[in-house]
Amino acid sequence: MQELIKDIPVFSESTDSKSCATAPIISKENSQNGQRKLYIESYGCQMNFSDSEIVSAIMQKEGFGTTSNYAEADLVFLNTCSIREKAEQTVRNRLKEIQAAKKKKPEMLIGILGCMAERLKSKFLEEEKIVDLVVGPDAYRDLPMLIKTVDQGQKAVNVLLSREETYADISPVRLNSNGVSAFISIMRGCDNMCSFCVVPFTRGRERSRDPESILAEARQLFAEGYKEVTLLGQNVDSYKWAGESDKKATEEAEKVGKPTVNFANLLALIAEISPDLRVRFSTSHPKDITDEVLYTIKKYENICNYIHLPAQSGNSRVLELMNRTYDRAWYIDRVDAIRRIIGQDCGISTDMITGFCTETEEEHQDTLSLMEYVSYDFAYMFAYSERPGTLAAKKYADDIPLDIKKRRLAEVIVVQQRNSLKRNQMSIGKIEKVLVEGISKRNPNDLKGRDSSNKVVIFPKKHYKKGDYVNVLIKDCSAATLFGESIE
């Protein structure tokens, strides 16, 4: 997943993104003779890919090996995304392809995991005759029992959501890892009822993970040679722990003076594991990101100067319709605070939706002007796609014609491409500390890595290797990439 997400600075609905990866990440080869083989294919957000690593760990404990070829698998899982209609259609099309393999291997079991599983529930078992089990994001511990049910000739489904499940005690199996970067899930679910979003309905209420288990996972990764961790949550800034994962229980504990670990505290604890362990995080919510978090980033050199801060729109009325709980002025204040406290070089990325319900041309212009004001380094950009069951689908008409949505999206993309180039040009002549992730795809004599602000950097390999920190003098750039020479 790192490859899909980090190599492209501008994302639209036709490209891979954190919100809807059109190209999946699959399991790697790791099986012994006689083992049943698992093939798992993951779509969508970083959390889905992290969940697939948890699923792989659970299945490994049950004696399953893994394969990178679904035709050889005894068990095929598609870990799905419901954020956009296109994501769901991609999975349906993939099921048709896998059906041909199942005809040749009738004993193959096929399961749908993740957000589509929760949203569509038993419809998959009724409509997609080749699907044997449907399992939601909070029910992965139940997979061994569900598979036994299917082995006995029955269909199986568990899409129950939980207020406590965080999988804190499960050590994920790192799928297709580059051995340098890894994800750590710090919380699950979401309490923000954005009117366009299905996540609260597919992933349940927000709950935080025990900080000691997070620290233990980070320490273990560093001991295994990983140099970077990305802390994941639908809204990391609302992370809070006072002995309870449940948000209300934590708030009650706070009232009686029980010590609380917030996100700024957690960042500092992980940064102090080692100065050689880089720390990233995603995603921040504009209503919750605090100056305390920003000052913590500034204090620790190994906390990366990069914040994903989704705006969704640049117009206050549209933001209110989206139920984002902030307005344009609030968002600009948070951007100004980032630039003031961390610095102008801090990378900022966003999500933008064009053509939301009743959006006018003037309001669309507000989005373009916000993009110019912030000058984002990266952006994930989409035309509005109504999702069944969301507040917007219930309350508002999807009344912007598709051609207008696409035209507005094209205008947003043009602005972002220009700003991505401008932000990259600011690095020319500077020395950036780059963490090497591997060989460049285009030239085997070059290495590829990223700097603190999440920009991809290409430079000659020389004697350096994957996992090294290298000081690179930036000499040139494109809108997508920095190019430079290492300096001793």
Image: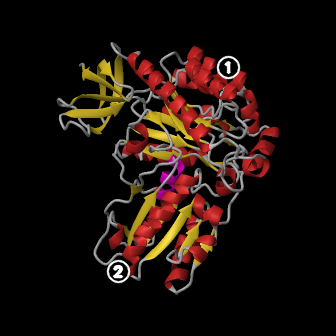
**Residue position for label 1:** 333
Residue 368, horizontal then vertical, whole percent: 59, 24
Q: Which image quadrant is residue 356 in?
A: top right
Place residue 327 in its image quadrant: top right
Q: Residue at x 52, y 53 (%)?
A: 48
The amino acid sitting under disc 1 is Asp
Q: Nearer the viewer, mark 2 or mark 1?
A: 2
Alpha-carbon distance for marks 2 and 1?
Answer: 59 Å
Q: Residue at x 69, y 51 (%)?
A: 200
Q: Is residue 193 visible?
A: yes
**Highlighted magenta segment, given as a residue range:** 46-53
Asked whether, in this view, residue 253 is left or right of residue 239, the answer is right
Magenta stretch prevailing secondary structure = helix
Residue 256 shows in this picture: no
- Report if the CB atoms under discs 2 and 1 are less than 8 Å apart: no
Q: Does residue 340 lie above or below 77 as drawn?
A: above
Assign a secondary structure to mark 2. Answer: helix
Instruction: Please name the amino acid that badge 2 sits on.
Output: Lys
From the image, tell me which residue sits under label 2: 104
Q: Position of residue 116 (x, y in %)?
A: 59, 61
Q: Residue furthest bottom?
A: 152
- The picture places residue 217, in percent across and down from the top left corner, at 48, 48
Across the whole image, how many numbered discs are drawn on residues? 2
Asked whether 124 falls inside the magenta stretch, the response is no
Bin the neighbour count of mark 1 within 10 Å (Cα to Cα): few under 14, some 14-19, many 20 and up: few
